[in-house]
Image (cartoon, rainbow, N blue to C red):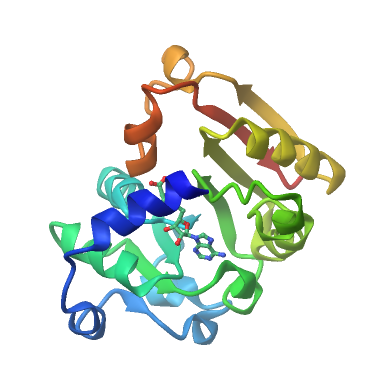
């Protein structure tokens, strides 16, 4: 946990004007409940909807949106300063990308069964057993994801944290998801994952040890 918090705090030390950045951003949504069931109207098309929960500084979701204009992307993040830094880093406004400021605990209020894919990239591991419910793959969250994913929807998880990965495998399994395409060292298996787009945390930790990967299907 310290590792994750330290990186974020160090990078945010010098960030000023957070309120101004957030208040003037046209693609930041603070009341996402009003779009529940209506995201296609906001995007103005029927393209698939992919979301990243805990997008951090947004490298992954921005590069995906740039590369795949026929997919609609929504990045979810709960901390203002983190969002402000992400917005500052984006080179230009993309029609297929929005950010929601929200805690993932409230995700059910923002989407109907309209999400095709959820990315969970380097989610906080919450190592203490007493905090297990806060992990983004705990039953509490998986029950919410089931209510926002389409019937054939999928969750893709990447993490450097073996304990979180093991916990997630069990949790997906116990909660009715079908797990496929497990990989225990993503960067040593580039033939299988030639199009992998790295996240900020992935760049930081991929030289220190393996990156774990899985896909969990709603069925
Ligand atoms: C370790 S960082 C990883 C960031 C990014 N996905 C990456 O791989 O570089 C985890 C991020 O998830 C966010 N986060 C954690 N729990 C969250 C929640 N319940 N709702 C929204 N964001 C959350 C944190 O604020 C943090 O920015």
Query: In the visual, does 172 lie left or right of 84?
Result: right
Query: In the visual, does 20 lie left or right of 143?
Result: left
Question: What residue is rendered at 65% in x and 54% in y?
Answer: 135
Residue 142 picture location, percent across and down: 73, 56
Residue 19 picture location, percent across and down: 24, 84
Reply above or below: 153 against 31.
above
How many numbered marks appear? 0
Q: Residue furthest left?
A: 91
Question: What residue is rendered at 51% in x and 78% in y?
Answer: 38
Say which of 2 and 22 sits in front: 2
Reply above or below: 198 against 31.
above
Residue 91 picture location, percent across and down: 13, 57
Residue 197 appears anywhere in the view: no
Query: In the visual, does 207 lie left or right of 49?
Result: left
Question: What residue is rendered at 48% in x and 55% in y?
Answer: 48
Say which of 147 and 124 sits in front: 124
Point out the image quarter for the C terminus. Answer: top right
Reply above or below: 46 against 206.
below
Residue 186 appears anywhere in the view: yes
Say which of 135 and 147 sits in front: 135
Question: What residue is rendered at 68% in x and 40% in y?
Answer: 216
């Amino acid at each position: 946990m310290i590792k994750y918090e330290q990186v974020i705090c160090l990078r945010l030390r010098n960030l000023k004007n957070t309120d101004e950045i957030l208040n003037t951003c046209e693609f930041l949504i603070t009341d996402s409940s009003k779009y529940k069931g209506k995201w296609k109207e906001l995007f103005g098309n029927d393209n698939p909807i992919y979301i990243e929960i805990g997008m951090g500084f947004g490298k992954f979701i921005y590069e995906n949106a740039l590369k795949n204009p026929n997919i609609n992307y929504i990045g979810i993040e709960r901390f203002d300063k983190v969002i402000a830094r992400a917005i500052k880093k984006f080179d230009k406004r993309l029609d297929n990308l929005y950010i929601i400021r929200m805690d993932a605990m409230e995700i059910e209020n923002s989407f109907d069964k309209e999400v095709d894919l959820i990315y969970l990239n380097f989610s906080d591991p919450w190592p203490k057993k007493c905090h297990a419910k806060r992990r983004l793959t705990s039953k509490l969250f998986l029950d919410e994801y089931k209510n926002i994913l389409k019937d054939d929807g999928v969750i893709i998880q990447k993490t450097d944290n073996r304990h979180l990965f093991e916990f997630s495998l069990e949790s997906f399994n116990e909660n009715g998801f079908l797990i496929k395409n497990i990989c225990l060292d993503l960067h040593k298996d580039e033939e299988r994952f030639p199009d992998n787009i790295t996240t900020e945390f992935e760049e930081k930790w991929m030289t220190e040890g393996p990156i774990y990967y899985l896909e969990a299907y709603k069925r």
